[in-house]
Amino acid sequence: MDTKAEFKALRIYEEDGKFIRRIEKRKIEDLPEGDVIVKVKYSSLNFKDALSVTGNKGVTRKYPHTPGIDAAGVVEHSESDKFKVGDQVIVTSYDLGMNSDGGFAEYIRVPEAWVVALPKDLSLRQAMIYGTAGFTAALSVYRLLAAGQTPEMGPVVVTGALGGVGSIAISILASLGFEVIAATFEKSGGEDELHELGVASRISSEITDDQSGRPLLRPLWAGAIDVIGGNTLHTLLKACKPMGNVTCCGNVGSGDLAMTMYPFILNGISLIGIDSQKCPMELRQKVWDKLAAEWNEYNNNEQVIESSLENLDIYIDLMLAKKSRGRVIVKI
C-alpha cells in the first residue's frame, strides 16, 4: 500500500489554550503503528469523542489528534494472520480515538487485537448505529441477565434514555419482555421516540437524583442501567427493590459516589461495573453477535442521524449541551 497516499481526517489542534477543529489531508505514513490498515466507511459520535474534541486531558493527552472511538470499514492492508485484505471489520474501544488516531478519518491503522470481524447479517452502517454506545448498552443488558435479572422481578429504569446508550438499552430490554422506565433530563419531548423504543413509563431525572440524604428510599424499580453516575447512581441503588441489579457505565454527571453500604447489606443490591473499553475479546465477540441477531432491534429506528465530517460540529455541540438524542453516525 502506498504510505504516501493522502486521506481526509478531522484534526483537533491546541492553540493558545483553545482547541480548534480542522478537516485536513494526512498521509498513511502519519498513522500510528499497527498490523491492520482499515479504510473507514462509517464512524459514530460518542461522549468521549466530544470530550476529546474539547481538550479533555483525561481522554486525550496530546494534540494534534484525530478523535473517533468507533470505526467500521474494510481491511486495506494487513500484516495479521487473522485478517486479510477485503475483510469487513469493526474497531471500537481500546485506545482508538483517545490517544491513538481514531475513526473520524478515511483510514486508521491499529493492532490486530483491537479488530472484530463484522458479524454475519450486520452491515458496516448498522455496526456504527450501534458502535461503542450500542455495544455498551448490550454489554449492560448481558451483565444484568447474567446476574439473574428477569422481567418478573419488576421494572428496570434506564437513565439518559434519549441518548445513545440509553435508547439502545431500552430497545433491547423491551424486546426481552422487561417493563422499562425511561429517565430523561427533559421533562417533555421525545414521547414518540420513547414509545417506539418500547418504554412503559417516563420519569424526570429529578426523581433519579434524590436530595433527601436518606440512605434508603421506598423501592421504585427492580433494576437499572445508568449512564450518569454520581448522585443519580446513588439514588438508583437506594431506591432499588431487594436483590436487584444496577449497572454503571458512565459518569456524565459525576465520577464521585458518596453513599452508605445499606443498599448492599440490607437490600442485597448488586452494583455491576461496565467496561466496554477493555472487555475481553471473547465476550466482545459474543455481544456483537447478539447485536447482529436476536438483539438487533434498533437499526430501523428513526432516531439515527447521519452526518458528514464537515457537519459533525453541530452534533458535538449538542452532545456537550446534553441535548443529543439517539445515535449520530458519521459517513466517511
Image (cartoon, helix red, strand yellow):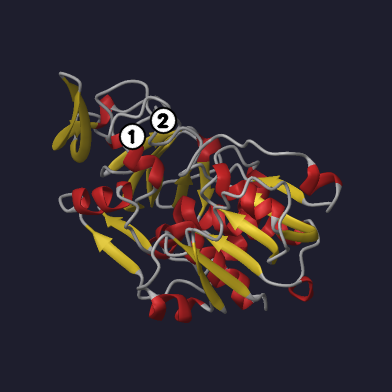
Q: Residue at x 45, y 75 (%)?
A: 194
Q: Against 14, is 332 above or below? A: below
Q: Is residue 179 left or right of residue 265?
A: left
Q: Against 168, is 51 above or below? A: above
Q: Is residue 270 left or right of residue 100?
A: right
- Assign a secondary structure to mark 1: helix
Residue 185 visible from this viewpoint: yes
Q: Against 326, is 200 above or below? A: below
- Assign a secondary structure to mark 2: loop
Q: Residue at x 61, y 50 (%)?
A: 212
Instruction: List the residue tagged with mark 2.
Output: 59
Viewer-nearest residue: 194 or 230: 230
Q: Residue at x 64, y 45 (%)?
A: 213
Residue 260 is situated, as x and y percent measured from the top left of the image, at 74, 39
- Mark with earlier residue (1, 2): 1
Instruction: List the residue tagged with mark 1.
Output: 52
Q: Are marks 1 and 2 in contact (CB under 8 Å)?
A: yes
User: For the residue marked with disc 2, what is the amino acid?
Assistant: Val
Q: Residue at x 55, y 61 (%)?
A: 207
- In whole angstroms, how far apart are the C-alphas of marks 1 and 2? 6 Å
Q: Toward which corner of the image does residue 9 lie, by quadrant?
A: top left
Q: Against 290, is 80 above or below? A: above
User: For the residue marked with disc 1, what is the amino acid?
Assistant: Ser
Residue 38 is situated, as x and y percent measured from the top left of the image, at 37, 43
Q: Toward which corner of the image does residue 304 lie, by quadrant?
A: bottom left
Residue 269 is situated, as x and y percent measured from the top left of the image, at 78, 52
Viewer-nearest residue: 161 or 266: 266
Residue 102 visible from this viewpoint: no
Q: Is residue 53 left or right of residue 299?
A: left
